[in-house]
């Protein structure tokens, strides 16, 4: 177990996962949590990262900092995704070793697994066949981080563990339609369509003032012109009578509330070592859902009354990404927040 006064650094504390880890640590009574914003500390800069570790000397590190995004963001900015994620992981892991960090937890992603991996995906299927092309750059950077942790453990005797969470959603999520992950992107589309159908342009303006749409639309919208607002929402798939979704709804995805992931991370950091976990461990409950069914759950949660329509010219992504939960359950952990209840709570938080 970790002393409640131990110095703990959470890299990426403003992100979806990092902020959930900070909340969980605070709930558990940890009192010496260190954070830095990207403006205060550029983790892609080796000199800055080493200087920070030498000065602060954290005992434990959660590596949740990353450049993340959905399918289109990954396809549009592949060089940024591989470069920034490689640099962050390399700098933090190496600095943790050089400053004698007791334990580091590296957060990866389910996209590390092959596109057509046997389902459910076991940890052992890593690098057994080709990756999904739409997020290959990001996946390669995350795989490199896993290997870095493994080889530092083997050569230097460090205690660096890697966890591979399934798709996340939760408090502090990103709702930019260009860069958001699946669930917040879809949920916001339904929400805006509902407001549009109700003619509630005041609520739409408040939403647009808080969250960007992306795709260059924010600069084009005239918030005083309802027609301009409606045209912009139509471009992101939100209409009065329908919501347009990408692909055909046939693929499967697994989702987990970020508070569940944070619970798993804090549990593993305090109770399990590299030798217990192995190269990496999936964080999942081992179940998934077809997107057409997920969309119906989101539609119900938001209260939208229109119809669903699919844009089959847009990519589906990996056919299925169900991860195997055998190893994490054998380590004594399993999630607590059900999908429908989690989405309902997530939407209530978003509306507030």
Image (cartoon, grey):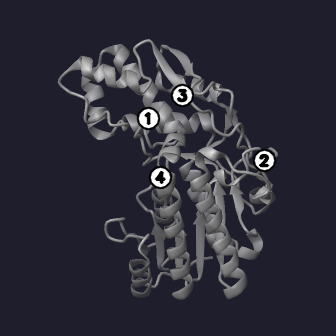
Q: Nearer the viewer, mark 2 or mark 3?
A: 2
Along the line of sight, the residue nearer the viewer: 269 or 86: 86
Of the numbered discs in the image, which one, if any, rests on residue 16? 4
**Are dots 4 and 3 in contact, CB under 8 Å?**
no
Closer to the chain start, of discs 4 and 2, is: 4
Along the line of sight, the residue nearer the viewer: 296 or 96: 96
User: Where does the image place residue 13, in percent across and percent down from the top left?
Assistant: 43, 62
Return the residue at label 1.
Answer: 348
Closer to the chain start, of discs 2 and 1, is: 2
Q: Is residue 150 above or below residue 134?
A: below
* Cα separation between marks 4 and 1: 17 Å
Of the numbered discs in the image, which one, if any, rests on residue 110? none
Closer to the chain start, of discs 4 and 1, is: 4
Quarter of the image with the N terminus is: bottom right
Please tell me in which quadrant of the rendered image residue 206 appears. Answer: top left
User: Where does the image place residue 143, in percent across and percent down from the top left?
Assistant: 65, 62
User: Where does the image place residue 185, in percent across and percent down from the top left?
Assistant: 47, 35
Residue 65 visible, this orientation: no
**Are dots 3 and 1 in contact, CB under 8 Å?**
no
* Cα separation between marks 2 and 3: 28 Å
* Cα separation between marks 4 and 3: 19 Å
Q: Which residue is drawn at 82% across and 46% down?
A: 118
Residue 288 visible, this orientation: yes
Badge 3, how many Cα within 10 Å: few under 14, some, many 20+?
many
Return the residue at label 3.
Answer: 298
User: Where does the image place residue 252, in percent across and percent down from the top left?
Assistant: 69, 35
What SS does tag 1 mark?
helix
């Amino acid at each position: 177990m970790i002393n409640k006064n131990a110095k703990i650094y959470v890299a990426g504390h403003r992100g979806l996962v990092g902020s959930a880890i900070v909340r969980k640590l605070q709930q558990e009574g940890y009192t010496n949590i260190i954070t830095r914003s990207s403006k205060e500390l550029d983790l892609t800069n080796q000199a800055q990262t080493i200087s920070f570790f030498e000065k602060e000397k954290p005992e434990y590190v959660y590596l949740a900092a990353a450049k993340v995004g959905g399918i289109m963001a990954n396809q549009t900015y592949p060089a940024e995704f591989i470069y920034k994620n490689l640099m962050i992981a390399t700098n933090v892991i190496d600095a943790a070793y050089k400053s004698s960090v007791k334990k580091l937890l590296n957060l990866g992603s389910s996209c590390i697994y092959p596109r057509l991996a046997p389902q459910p995906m076991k940890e052992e299927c890593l690098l057994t066949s080709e990756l999904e092309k739409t997020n290959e750059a990001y996946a390669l950077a995350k795989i490199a981080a896993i290997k870095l942790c493994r080889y530092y453990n083997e050569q230097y005797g460090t205690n660096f563990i890697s966890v591979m969470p399934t798709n996340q959603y939760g408090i502090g999520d990103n709702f930019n339609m260009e860069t958001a992950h699946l669930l917040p992107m879809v949920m916001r589309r339904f929400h805006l369509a509902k407001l549009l159908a109700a003619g509630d342009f005041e609520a739409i303006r408040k939403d647009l003032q808080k969250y960007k749409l992306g795709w260059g639309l924010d600069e084009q919208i005239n918030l005083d012109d309802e027609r301009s607002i409606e045209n912009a929402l139509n471009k992101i798939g939100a209409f009065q009578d329908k919501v347009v979704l990408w692909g055909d709804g046939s693929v499967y995805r697994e989702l987990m509330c970020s508070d569940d992931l944070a619970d798993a991370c804090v549990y593993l950091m305090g109770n399990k070592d590299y030798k217990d976990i192995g190269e990496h461990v999936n964080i999942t409950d081992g179940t998934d859902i077809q997107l057409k069914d997920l969309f119906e759950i989101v539609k119900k949660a938001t209260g939208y009354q229109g119809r669903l329509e699919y844009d089959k010219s847009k990519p589906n992504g990996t056919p299925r990404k169900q991860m195997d939960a055998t190893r994490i359950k054998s380590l004594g952990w399993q999630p607590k927040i059900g999908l429908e209840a989690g989405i309902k709570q997530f939407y209530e938080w978003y509306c507030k």
